[in-house]
Amino acid sequence: MNTAWLLLFSTLGITSAWASDAPLAPHHGERRALLEKHCAENPDRCKEMRAQLEQRRAQCQADPVKCREERHAAMEKRCAENPERCHAAKSQAARRRAHCEGDPAKCREQHQARAAARFQQADADGNGVLSKAEAERGLPGLARRFDALDGNQDGQLSRDEIEAARKARAGGKSGERHHGPG
């Protein structure tokens, strides 16, 4: 599968590590670097892919159930095409879940450390908060929710604002699963 399409589809949540022929899907930072390289080499194709991405995001916001069903169907198709890779990915996910169920505090701590590192990497000027431009460059998923997360509406996101939004979204659910920095 073309790396750029894999990157686009992974951004959309349409694929996972086992969908490509690579042993493991690239880490988020590596994916960004590959996408930037592809965009530099193919700017017109990149614009087209980004437009498709935005269109898909809008469709998924309008009908999230349909998007989940489509992702599930695509996953089932990939599993039928490559059962060994599918089994390996499912086994890896099960091991991660079991590990986190065995020591949720350690998993939460590790996740928070990774989120803090992503936040720090995105904070280009090192002032401890993210501007919208920094979020767009370093944490595009967070940038899409920037205005909603910016509790004091100062045009900057602090880790405290992100954490407050995470807790509000978790609503006291056990395990407090979330995605993104915070």
Image (cartoon, rainbow, N blue to C red):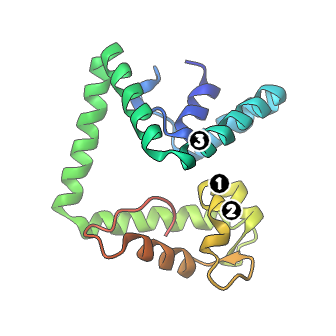
Pointers 2 and 1 in contact (CB under 8 A)? Answer: yes
Q: Tell me which numbered mark, 1 or 3, is placed earlier along the sequence.
A: 3
Query: Label 1 crowding class (10 Å Cα cut-off): few <14, some 14-19, many 20+?
Result: some
Task: Give the residue at x 74% y 36%.
Answer: 51
Q: Tell me which numbered mark, 2 or 1, is placed earlier along the sequence.
A: 2
Looking at the rendered structure, the kind of residue marked 1 is: Pro
Question: Mark 1 = which residue?
Answer: 140
Q: Position of residue 156 (x, y in %)?
A: 71, 76
Q: Position of residue 159 (x, y in %)?
A: 56, 77
Secondary structure category for the residue under label 1: helix
Residue extending farthest to the left is: 102
Q: Is residue 16 above or below residue 124?
A: above
Question: Mark 2 = which residue?
Answer: 135
Pointers 2 and 3 in contact (CB under 8 A)? Answer: no
Task: Give the residue at x 30% y 26%.
Answer: 86
Alpha carbons under labels 2 and 3: distance apart: 23 Å
Query: Label 3 crowding class (10 Å Cα cut-off): few <14, some 14-19, many 20+?
Result: few
Pointers 1 and 3 in contact (CB under 8 A)? Answer: no
Work out whether residue 47 or residue 31 is closer to the camera in this orientation and state it. Answer: 47
| Residue 93 placement: quadrant | top left
Work out whether residue 59 or residue 3 is closer to the camera in this orientation and state it. Answer: 59
Looking at the rendered structure, the kind of residue marked 2 is: Ala
Q: Is residue 36 toward the left or the right of residue 159 in the image?
A: right
Image quarter hosting the N terminus = top right
Residue extending farthest to the top is: 81
Q: Nearer the viewer, mark 1 or mark 3?
A: 3
